[in-house]
C-alpha cells in the first residue's frame, strides 16, 4: 500500500485537474470576475459554500486568485468576502501541503536526485516565514510554496499558523477592492486600490529583494 500511495495521489491530482476542467465548462465560468460573480449569484443559498470551494480548488479550475478573490467582496461584501476568501485559501493550502507531505521527498529522489536534498534544505530554512509572506502578498505564488512546504516536511503546526495568520490579509486586500467595483471612482474605491497597490509593491522596499530582482532581470536579458 505504501508503494501504491504516490501513484494514487498522482492520479488524485490528475483527477482534480480533469474534474476542474469539466466543472468549469459545465458552469460556463470564464476568466473574468463578472463571469464568476454571475455563477456564484445563480447558486442562491449555496453561494457562500460554492465560493469557498471555488477558492479552494481554483488551481484545478484554472482560475488565478487575483480574479477569484475580488468576487468575494463583490458578492458578499468586504467582511464576509474576506472571511470566505481566507477560509478557501487555508483549505487550499492544507490540501496541497497534505498531498505533497504524503508523497514525500523519497518519491522525488529517483527523478531529481541530489537536487531534492538542496531543495529540502532551502525550504526548511525558509519555512513558515516564507509561507506567511507569500500568503499575505497579493501576488505571492502560493501554490508552489505550499507544495514545497509539504515536500520539505515543514512542521504541520508552524505551516498552519503561518497560513491562518496571513490568509486574511491577502483575502482582505482583494475583498475590499472587490466590494468597491460597483462604485468605481469613489473615495472608497481609490482607498482599496491604494491598499492593493501598496501591498503588491511592498517587497520592493527591501534592498535585498530589489537586488535579486535586478540580478534576475539582467540574466534574463537576451545577449546580442
Image (tube, helix red, strand yellow):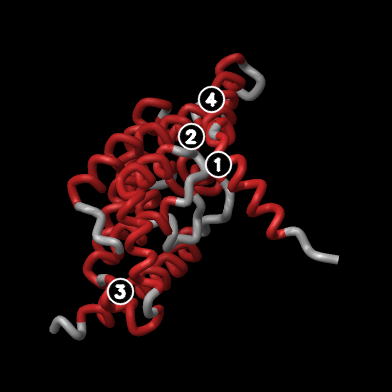
Q: Residues within 10 Å of mark 1 (few under 14, many from 20)?
A: few
- Where is mark 3, residue-wise? 12
**Residue underneath mark 2:** 174
Residue position for label 1: 209
Task: State the separation of the CA atoms marked 4 and 1.
Answer: 20 Å
Above-or-below relation of 63 to 80: below
Check disc 4 and report the residue beneath it. 195
Which residue ends up furthest to the left in the rendered image? 1
Q: Are marks 1 and 3 in contact (CB under 8 Å)?
A: no
> Which mark is first along the chain, 4 or 3?
3
Evaluate if marks 4 and 1 touch, with contact meaning CB atoms under 8 Å apart. Answer: no
In the rendered image, the vertical position of residue 133 relative to residue 54, given as above or below? above
Residue in the picture at 20% in, 52% down: 155
Question: Does the residue at mark 4 contact the one at mark 2 (Cβ under 8 Å)?
Answer: no
Name the mark nearer the viewer: 1 or 3.
1
Disc 4 from disc 2: Cα separation: 9 Å
Sequence-wise, which precedes: disc 4 or disc 1? 4
Q: Which mark is residue 36?
A: none
The secondary structure type at the circle numbered 4 is: helix
Mark 1 or 3, nearer chain start: 3
Mark closer to the observer (4, 2) = 4
Describe the element under mark 2 as helix, strand or loop.
Answer: helix
| Labels 3, 4: front one | 4
Q: Residue 146: percent from the left, percent from the top?
A: 35, 55
Q: Earlier in the sequence, mark 2 or mark 1?
A: 2
Q: Quadrant of the C terminus?
A: bottom right
Say which quadrant the N terminus sits in.
Answer: bottom left
Q: Residues within 10 Å of mark 2 (few under 14, many from 20)?
A: many
Mark 3–mark 4 Cα distance, whole angstroms, equals 38 Å
| Spot occupied by residue 168 in the image (x, y as percentages of width and height) | 35, 34
Q: Who comes first in sequence, dot 2 or dot 3?
A: 3
Q: In this picture, is 25 found above or below 197?
A: below
Amino acid at each position: 500500500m505504501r508503494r501504491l500511495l504516490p501513484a494514487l495521489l498522482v492520479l488524485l491530482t490528475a483527477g482534480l485537474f480533469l474534474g476542474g476542467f469539466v466543472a468549469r465548462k459545465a458552469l460556463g465560468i470564464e476568466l473574468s470576475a463578472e463571469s464568476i460573480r454571475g455563477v456564484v449569484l445563480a447558486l442562491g443559498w449555496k453561494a457562500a459554500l460554492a465560493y469557498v470551494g471555488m477558492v479552494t480548488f481554483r488551481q484545478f479550475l484554472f482560475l488565478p486568485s487575483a480574479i477569484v478573490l475580488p468576487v468575494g467582496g463583490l458578492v458578499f461584501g468586504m467582511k464576509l468576502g474576506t472571511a470566505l476568501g481566507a477560509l478557501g485559501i487555508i483549505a487550499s493550502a492544507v490540501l496541497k501541503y497534505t498531498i505533497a507531505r504524503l508523497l514525500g521527498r523519497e518519491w522525488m529522489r529517483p527523478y531529481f536526485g541530489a537536487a531534492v536534498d538542496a531543495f529540502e534544505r532551502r525550504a526548511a530554512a525558509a519555512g513558515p516565514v516564507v509561507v506567511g509572506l507569500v500568503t499575505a502578498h497579493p501576488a505571492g505564488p502560493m501554490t508552489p510554496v505550499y507544495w514545497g512546504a509539504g515536500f520539505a516536511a515543514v512542521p504541520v503546526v508552524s505551516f498552519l499558523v503561518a497560513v491562518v495568520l496571513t490568509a486574511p490579509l491577502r483575502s482582505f486586500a482583494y475583498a475590499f477592492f472587490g466590494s468597491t467595483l460597483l462604485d468605481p471612482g469613489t473615495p472608497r474605491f481609490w482607498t482599496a486600490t491604494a491598499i492593493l497597490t501598496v501591498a503588491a509593491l511592498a517587497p520592493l522596499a527591501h534592498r535585498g529583494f530589489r537586488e535579486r530582482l535586478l540580478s534576475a532581470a539582467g540574466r534574463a536579458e537576451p545577449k546580442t
